[in-house]
């Protein structure tokens, strides 16, 4: 693995440990997902309350395809950010980012901290852009993305369905890593 763990601080001073997921995190990740309310789970692509899915993720880690970064507070997972990559094709330069934060740790700076880490990792991995989709009404998520260098690029009406089966709009956010890290154009 090209990186290890990193310590960070939330706005309220809480210490958070960030590191890539390893096989031994299976139980802690499952515990994290079982604590989440349905309102958050509905936006995930998999039924994360199914123990088999989490087991498969833990046993078949492939950082080349999906890089899961976990946030721990006192040994408990409180945040999960994943970077999804494709090895070839027209999207090989783009990483898709997905973020899930424990409601008790929302609005405390954790999403921004984790997204900043993904921006650095994406750059180190040679990606040019990071891409995310978030519900348009998620003000805190939009703020976290903007704080981490993402900009709002498009709104797609009725893209998602919430827990009550209502259509909601999706906001596409993109972080252009090649310009974000382009220090050559700055005067010295």
Image (tube, helix red, strand yellow):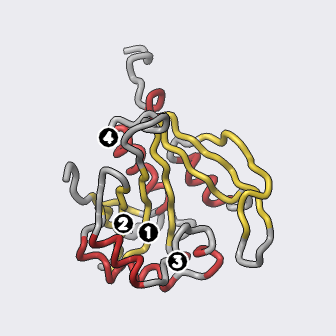
How crowded pointer 2 is (Cα within 10 Å; few <14, some 14-19, many 20+) is rated as: many
Which is nearer the N-term, disc 1 or disc 4?
A: 1
Which is nearer the N-term, disc 1 or disc 3?
A: 3
Which residue: 36% across, 66% down?
A: 70
Q: Which mark is residue 70?
A: 2
Q: Which mark is residue 79?
A: 1
Closer-to-camera residue (142/23) = 23
Which residue: 72% across, 71% down?
A: 162
Where disc 3 sits, the SS reads loop
Alpha carbon distance from label 2 to label 3: 18 Å
Residue marked by disc 3: 47
Can residue 105 be seen at all in this image of the molecule? no
How crowded pointer 1 is (Cα within 10 Å; few <14, some 14-19, many 20+) is rated as: many
Residue marked by disc 4: 125
Q: Are marks 1 and 2 in contact (CB under 8 Å)?
A: yes
Which is nearer the N-term, disc 1 or disc 2?
A: 2
Which is nearer the N-term, disc 4 or disc 3?
A: 3
Quadrant hosting residue 29: bottom left
Q: Which one is in front in this view, the residue at disc 4 or the one at disc 3?
A: 3
Q: Which one is in front in this view, the residue at disc 1 or the one at disc 3?
A: 3
């Amino acid at each position: 693995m090209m990186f290890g763990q990193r310590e960070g601080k939330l706005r309220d001073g809480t210490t958070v440990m960030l590191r890539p997921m390893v096989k031994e995190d299976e139980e802690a990740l499952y515990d994290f997902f079982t604590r989440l309310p349905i309102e958050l789970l509905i936006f995930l692509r998999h039924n994360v309350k199914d123990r088999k899915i989490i087991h498969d993720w833990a046993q078949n880690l492939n950082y080349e395809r999906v890089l899961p970064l976990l946030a721990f507070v006192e040994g408990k997972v409180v945040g999960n950010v994943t970077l999804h990559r494709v090895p070839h094709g027209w999207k090989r330069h783009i990483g898709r980012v997905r973020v899930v934060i424990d409601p008790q740790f929302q609005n405390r700076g954790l999403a921004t901290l984790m997204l900043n880490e993904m921006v650095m990792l994406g750059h180190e991995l040679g990606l040019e852009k990071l891409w995310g989709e978030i519900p348009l009404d998620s003000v805190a998520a939009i703020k976290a993305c903007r704080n981490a260098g993402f900009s709002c690029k498009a709104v797609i009406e009725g893209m998602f369905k919430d827990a009550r089966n209502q259509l909601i709009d999706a906001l596409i956010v993109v972080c252009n890593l090649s310009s974000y890290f382009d220090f050559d154009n700055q005067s010295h």
